[in-house]
Image (cartoon, rainbow, N blue to C red):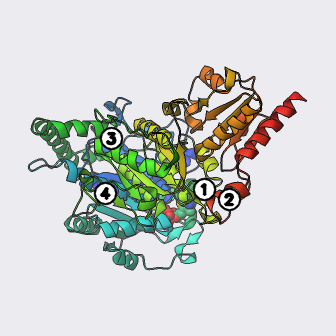
Amino acid sequence: MNRAVSVEQLAINTIRTLSMDAVEAARSGHPGTPMALAPVAYVLFRERLRYDPERPHWPNRDRFVLSCGHASMLLYATLHLAGVQQVGPDGQPTGELAVPLEAIRQFRQLGSRCPGHPEYRHTSGVETTTGPLGQGVANSVGMAIAAKWLAGYFNRPGFELFNFRVYALCSDGDLMEGIGAEAASLAGHLQLDNLCWIYDDNRITIEGPTSLAFSEDVGMRFSSYGWNVLRVADVNELGCLRSALDGFNQEPDRPTLIIVRSIIAWGAPTKQNHHEAHGAPLGDQEVRGAKAFYGWPEDQQFLVPPEVVEHFRQGHLADCHEQADQWYAMLAEYRKAYPDLAEQLDCLLEGRLPDGWDADWPSFPPDPKGMATRVASGKVLNHAAQRTAWLLGGSADLGPSNRTELSFPEAHGDFSVANPSGRNFHFGVREHAMGGICNGLALCGLRPFAGTFFVFTDYMRPSMRLAAMMGLPVLYILTHDSIGVGEDGPTHQPVEHLAALRAIPNMVVIRPADANETAQAYRVALQRRDGPTALVLTRQNLPVLDRSKLAPADGLSKGAYVLSEAAGGKPDVLLIGTGSEVHLCLAAQQQLQAEGIPTRVISMPSWELFEAQPAEYRKEVLPPSCLARVAVEAGVRQGWERYLGPQGRFVGMNSFGASAPEKVLYKHFGITTEAIVARAKEALQALRQ
Ligand SMILES: Cc1ncc(C[n+]2csc(CCOP(=O)(O)OP(=O)(O)O)c2C)c(N)n1
Ligand SMILES: [Mg+2]
């Protein structure tokens, strides 16, 4: 090895060569960008990011988001050198490296701490799961908002508990994606001066040079978003990188974009600056050539010079360790001075709800005229938010319709930098960024909610999927849930959306039948710590069911329950309804029983909660012997077969909706009491033949 090379250059080259070697060993992966951006990772993790490798969960650590998740080896190699420890399931460091060298050797193999793209909860030091471009930068905006909010709520004179900064590293793809633009626009509007995006301006994407499809002036775009835009002409000029990061630190009221010019696969003899270096192993010749260029032994793989490890962990990281010690000492004093706030902070950090979170839970008296479930939702949300201070959020410009506005004084109004403890967010008409930002808020311990029309979950779904994958307790408040929307017509009437959300693993979808089921749905959603919940709510009024005659609404927690038992207790027919169709099932039950057909009505607000019940319970609700079944839901049939079996019938939608008053539409599409009665009789008849 060329010993004349400085230790900092050695450290940078270690990141580069580990990345190349890991991709070669895996025979897949993305070597080019880690090779190019190693200097950025080096300066950030060795000199700038405030974090303690021994306490990766220090709440006031700076956050780093690798939005271009395909460059995962950049992060893994750096976490290895920094000596970041793995945190166990109990939240305590295990004393073991989060990324041991062995994990790098096993890059992209089953069970390795170095999966293809960074995965939250899997590898400590990975702050969020990235890979779908644009998600990470949106998460970073949520994290920067969280830093402001936590400071606004918890900091007290002499107790600056929260002041962390958020850095995101992003690529051309992150800035081409709409979500990146949405998130940047909002971050500029909110003047998030604690947010720094470092943009890898390598002018290469998968198909070739960015000139194929991307010709705007990114810097001008961000300037007009209200960002502080800085440039580094060559990523290898560490002095320029440092100055730009100083520029970020000194910026008083804007987020910062640092545009860094880099050359993908820097140092590879023929693949440097070529799109082929993006997502495939370089091959032995190129790897050797690059190593020779770096002054690295060509025959060695996974080489980590001991002086690099030592160099990495001195200086700045030692200071950070001390700062973390001081922070925990300050927290101990804070506990004495502000025991109530400290208790709240503990809850927040542990993912618990505060004592008394469900005191005086709302319930609604029977009312045949009824109430829309979105209206009930607004009331319950406001009730719950008064008891859990870090339940906060908003809507993508549909707050008044979604009933997501927190209207009590302690909600502190609208969030802004001037009013950082505000709990009402105006995400603007930016569903996708809203989803990504809520993930960032949840990653910092807050309990965010996000409202929009159910049909527009299509605009947010990629972020919802990541919330489910990461196990984040984000709450989606989705109103206008069916053709019940009425006159706005088919563009605004979801039909396939229930099926689409139910298809996402770890997403709990709840479609309550009335105001009281809505209240219970909130109990379930708030108690959920390890995944998101989608509340699917009506625009139109629904009768508030008379629970003195029907089963109590807390049956909702089991996903499905016998709402109204068949006369005589032995059903010939099962009617299974969700949401706004449950009361139609009750009316059909009356007609069928008047004709001597014992009929059970099952309210089934959530498939996922039902599937989590013991088999015994599921059989009680859906007796296997009773095969005459009708499911009623104003959506497509897809998936209902599992409960209907071959003999069952479905009353719902099999096309898009139409523009007309709600009642006309229900009739037009045949979602009526009469249709339910007819299908039930058909099913019975077919079984008797
Ligand atoms: C939403 C999304 N679409 C597509 C991809 C597939 N993909 C991965 S990287 C990439 C583009 C690569 O270009 P760039 O973002 O500039 O990264 P670089 O190769 O320069 O590191 C694409 C299209 C993705 N990961 N996410
Ligand atoms: Mg690029």
Q: Are marks 1 and 3 in contact (CB under 8 Å)?
A: no
Q: Residues within 10 Å of mark 1 (few under 14, many from 20)?
A: many
Disc number for residue 84: 3
Give the Cα separation between the discs numbered 4 and 2.
Answer: 43 Å
Disc number for residue 145: 4
Q: Residue furthest right?
A: 689
**Looking at the picture, how far across and down is residue 169, in whole percent?**
39, 60
- In this view of the protein, which residue sits in the foreground, 536 or 115? 536
| Ligand 1 within 8 Å, label 1 CB | no
Disc number for residue 484: 1
Q: Are marks 2 and 1 in contact (CB under 8 Å)?
A: yes
The three-letter code of the residue at mark 1 reads Gly
Of tags 1 and 3, which is closer to the observer?
1
Give the Cα separation between the discs numbered 2 and 1.
Answer: 8 Å
Between discs 2 and 1, the one toward the N terminus: 1
Of tags 1 and 4, which is closer to the observer?
1
Of tags 3 and 2, which is closer to the observer?
2
Between discs 1 and 3, the one toward the N terminus: 3
Residue topped by disc 2: 665
Residue at (53% x, 55% y) in the render: 539
The three-letter code of the residue at mark 4 reads Ile
Q: Is residue 547 above or below residue 43?
A: above
Q: How many marks?
A: 4
Residue at (86% x, 34% y) in the render: 686
Give the Cα separation between the discs numbered 4 and 3.
Answer: 25 Å
Q: Is residue 19 visible?
A: no
Give the Cα separation between the discs numbered 3 and 2.
Answer: 59 Å
Q: Which image quarter: residue 52?
A: top left
Between discs 4 and 3, the one toward the N terminus: 3
